Amino acid sequence: MRRAFALASLLMPLPAAAQTVQTGGALAVRWCTACHVVEAGQRLASDSAPSFRAIAARTDTTAATLDRYLSSGHTLMPDFSLSTQERDALVSYILSLRQKP
């Protein structure tokens, strides 16, 4: 019984992380698809906005740089006034698009 509980407690963070990525994906679809390609099957977006996959692939893209960018006002993007949880979810989603070596 104790072993099963220990194993279950080790696995608990995984669903939370996956849920954050899923939430970030839903936010991206709702708020970002007018300008960015946020999903593989998406066809329409602005020519001047990079895809989320391209943003994730940049060598200077980190959780901290994404959070800082999403926390400040942008001249090229609307101000969505994202909550901390929404920013965290979007950051997790964008970073999940990074190609694994």
Image (tube, rainbow, N blue to C red):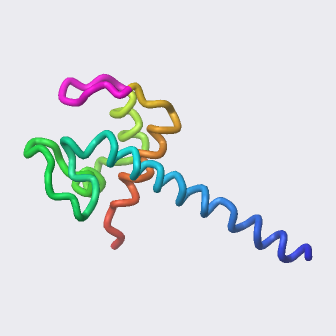
Rendered view: 50 above or below 83: below
The quarter holding residue 100 reads bottom left
Rendered view: 23 above or below 65: below
Residue 13: horizontal and vertical position, in percent?
65, 59
Residue at 47% from the left image edge and 46% from the top image edge: 89
Q: Farthest residue toward the front?
A: 30
Q: Quadrant of the C terminus?
A: bottom left
The quarter holding residue 68 reads top left
Is-magenta flag for residue 20?
Answer: no
Residue at 18% from the left image edge and 29% from the top image edge: 76
Q: Quadrant of the N terminus?
A: bottom right
Query: In the depicted view, which residue is nearer to us: 7 or 61?
Result: 7
Is-magenta flag for residue 73?
Answer: yes
Residue 96: horizontal and vertical position, in percent?
40, 59
Query: In the depicted view, which residue is nearer to us: 86 or 66?
Result: 86
Is 94 on the left or on the right of 16, as rendered? left
Q: Farthest residue toward the right?
A: 1
Is 7 on the left or on the right of 13, as rendered? right
Residue at 43% from the left image edge and 48% from the top image edge: 24
Provide the residue span drawn in magenta: 72-80
Query: In the depicted view, which residue is nearer to us: 60 or 40?
Result: 40
* Magenta stretch: dominant secondary structure: loop
> How many numbered discs, if any?
0
Residue 65: horizontal and vertical position, in percent?
36, 39
Is 49 on the left or on the right of 83, as rendered? left
